[in-house]
Amino acid sequence: MAWNLDNVPLYVAVVEHNGVSSAADYLQISKSAVSKALARLEHDLGVRLLTRNTRNLRITSEGEAFYRHCLLIMEQVNEANAVMAGFKTVPSGRLVIALPMAFGREIVAPHLGQFRAHYPQIDLELLITSHPVDIIREQIDLAVVIGSLNDSDLMVKKLYDSTLWCVTSPDYFKRNELGNTLEDLLQHIHLCEKRYVGKSFPIRIEGQKKILTLNKKMISVNDPIAVRSAVLNGFGIALVPDPYCRQHLATGELVRVFEHIEFEPSVSVISAIYPSRRLISNKTRAFLDFLIELCERI
């Protein structure tokens, strides 16, 4: 027979206040109502939850196990109430967000006016950085990170499956015989984002899995926009994440080359991370939703 969830708070009160009378006083209901609820639970569950006499009350092993589950139920109810209350309150207060340089400048910054118009009571602080951040130690509410993540206690929300494209300037394309092999490609890459230099990562060439390793001797820079700028001015071929070269490809300022070489999205995927609390604050949720919307436009 199914048992009634409405009796859970009464049972928790009996255990925590060590008796029916004390629980009734705490809940401000009659002793008979508490006793009947307890009796119904024991009948419906088919076990004795408590042993009691006129002087004391003792929880049984079955009652202890059920009590622990009741606490989880109550916690989930409280969390649901908090979430629903959050929908009714206006997001406000200090919010610290860490963003990679290119993502912050090109994806987020142009639309900050839109965010402020929707959430004027949020005191937003943006940290634009090329270095990894420790969001717990640095008290950061949310950070955007690039690439695959190691196992972590943080919550992760994928924002965009970015991928690397091989691009060059139209002038360089006209002046050079580029070829089509990996070895040919490496001959034309003179600089790269620091995160990729000297590392091997998976690619596919016409469906075949391969490994690309970038020479440690090439120029490294910690900003994809700087890489893009160099290539726009004729400095060979570069690997640029697609969000930062789409517009220049559309205008003809850049040309995509070696299109048969596909880079795994995990290398440059864009994700949001935040502390693994069961509840995310409504102000953090507001900014996360803002990021999701921006990434859907890319």
Image (tube, helix red, strand yellow):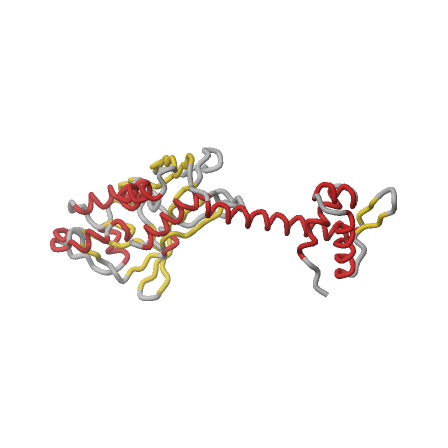
Q: Is residue 85 above or below residue 135?
A: below
Q: Residue at x 70, y 43 (%)?
A: 28
**Residue 157: x and y, percent?**
43, 51
Residue 189 seen in the figure: yes
**Residue 280: x and y, percent?**
48, 45
Q: Quadrant of the C terminus?
A: bottom left
Q: In terms of depth relative to the viewer, which is nearer, 67 or 171?
A: 67
Q: In terms of depth relative to the viewer, which is nearer, 68 or 264?
A: 68
Residue 279 appears left or right of 90: right
Q: Residue at x 45, y 38 (%)?
A: 135
* Residue 112 image-quadrant placement: top left
Q: In terms of depth relative to the viewer, which is nearer, 219 or 277?
A: 277
**Residue 141: x and y, percent?**
44, 39
Q: In terms of depth relative to the viewer, which is nearer, 179 or 122?
A: 122
Q: Quadrant of the N terminus?
A: bottom right
Q: Is residue 91 above or below residue 205?
A: above
Q: How many marks?
A: 0
Residue 45 appears left or right of 202: right
Outermost residue toward the right in this view: 54
**Residue 76: x and y, percent?**
59, 50
Residue 217 seen in the figure: no
Q: Residue at x 35, y 51 (%)?
A: 268
